[in-house]
Image (tube, rainbow, N blue to C red):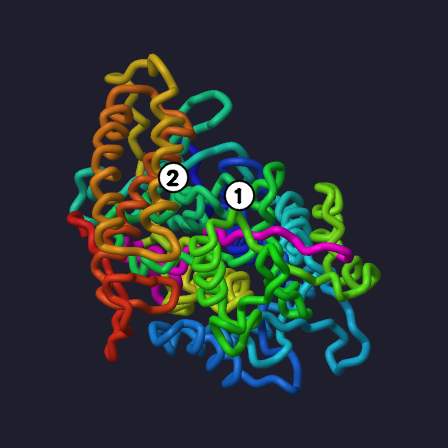
Amino acid sequence: MLQFDTLIIGSGLAGLTLALKLADHQKVGLITKKSLLDGASGWAQGGIAAVLSGEDSLDAHIQDTLTAGAGLCDETATRYVVEHGKAAIDWLIAQGVPFTKDNSNDMGYHLTREGGHSRRRIIHAADATGQAVQETLAARVFQHPNITVLEKYMSVDLITGNKLGRQDNRCYGVYVLNSLSGEVITIAAQNTILATGGTGKVYLYTTNPDTATGDGIAMAWRAGCRVANMEFIQFHPTCLYHPHAKSFLISEAVRGEGGILKLPDGTRFMPWHDERAELAPRDIVARAIDYEMKKRGLDCVYLDISHQSAEFLQEHFPTIYARCLSLGINISKEPIPVVPAAHYTCGGIVADLHARTDVPNLYAVGETAYSGLHGANRLASNSLLECMVFADAAVRDILSKPHEEGLALPAWDESRVTDADEQIVISHNWAELRHFMWDYVGIVRTNKRLQRAQHRIQLLQDEINEYYANFHISSDLLELRNLVLNAELIVRSALSRHESRGLHYSKDYPETITNPHPTILTPSNH
């Protein structure tokens, strides 16, 4: 059994920030199911939204967030995050993150603007902000003597008082699968933090990495935590459409710098859908593209930034320029084929302003959590900010608590399982799940489609649970088990919202109600 003061599950921006801020005071374990840099944070292109310029204001950032969130943001949480934004950026700069400089303003850094923002407030490192932040912090994590990094370890389930037959239901640690050896080890911790990211891989098309399988949300639900707003899945309007470009995002900043969306014949269509055209919030742009594709039977639409010079594009979008060029698309001369794709999970595990969940000693930070910041639609570049602000809040809460003695936890019991006779069940079920979620629980929904999805989810769950009970586990099986549970939570949430709002658009309930509430689901063991 391994033992830590705090165990962090996930190595995105939330996980790395937590580890570095705790490690001067505690023995920290950080587990990640692939390598340290494989999470979604490293894929973030645009940047981090924060009030950094004298021409901006906290109230303007708060108002932009509330507007994008379509009446469902928690105003207290929103103000809390925005007010702590500058401190989060200052900390990153102090860590050595190489943000793009601009000496023409009072702060010395270039700020860009994205859809839904009324000001330029996105600090960035060219068009690869996430990668720059992750590489900077990861180097520091590897060097810190108090941080133990365990790569290629996949969480199986949380160990709670309920599972141990105790009166309390606090979290005592986690069972973890070593993906290389197949061995399940026990990790005990006074505090456990879920920083596991979102659930984009439940859909056929996603901008997310393969690691985004909703593991934290599923484990927290099984442990007795409530989840909220799972119907609000953000579809990014512009994912590169190319057979050899899996999950490559074309940043919102391309539209911020003048990119125009066009049909195959060159006709511009966004002004037909919204007066803000290409700079409308993501849900409106994604729905407009979805509408035009379905109406005309198109495989994709086109994003044209070719009116900008090659020099401008190489300076502002070097990653996108190079990636497209490697696929034979010269974005300075021709438009980019794009489709919408599942991008961000706005809901998640219910967590308070200290990042605490319903289970004592269990925290949730970042995309896996529902903090109340994003409401019915996340404002661009608020996600990395949320990771940092709530990581800091969790650290302060953890360090304020008295030390508790750990328990000796039981080992994982494999005495009643055998090796699986065939793995094809897993790959078939995974493919089926992602296809029907895309078809039935995508950008536009109906009750009939949602009920079809619910029926299929139940059949899949029965198969997967039987498989889980009888065979040795694998990381593929664990991810599928978690994804199917996330799918169930998304569909249940969508069926319970009898209106269209933000990212949830229902043909059966096209109107918006006047007094909306978050969708909160409570597990039977809560």
Residue type for callout 2? His
Q: Residues within 10 Å of mark 1 (few under 14, many from 20)?
A: many
Residue type for callout 1? Pro
Asked if 422 appears above or below 224 in the picture, the reply is above
Q: Which x, y percent locates residue 238?
A: 56, 56
Q: Earlier in the sequence, mark 2 or mark 1?
A: 1
Q: Are marks 2 and 1 in contact (CB under 8 Å)?
A: no
Of 316 and 211, which appears nearest the observer?
316
Of 209 and 181, which appears nearest the observer?
209
Asked if 342 appears above or below 77 in the picture, the reply is above
Q: Residue at x 75, y 66 (%)?
A: 307
Q: Which x, y percent locates residue 510?
A: 28, 68
* Tag 1 residue: 209
As for residue 348 lying within the magenta part, the answer is yes
Q: Which mark is residue 435?
A: 2
Of 328 and 223, which appears nearest the observer?
328
Q: Residue at x 77, y 56 (%)?
A: 333
Q: Residues within 10 Å of mark 2 (few under 14, many from 20)?
A: some
Seen in the image, is 96 located left or right of residue 490? right
Asked if 4 appears above or below 46 in the picture, the reply is above
- Mark 1 element type: loop
Q: Which residues are magenta?
A: 332-360
Which of the 4 image quadrants contains residue 161?
top left
Q: Which x, y percent locates residue 245?
A: 61, 41
Task: Specify whether residue 392 is in view.
Answer: no
Q: Which mark is residue 238?
A: none
- Mark 2 element type: helix
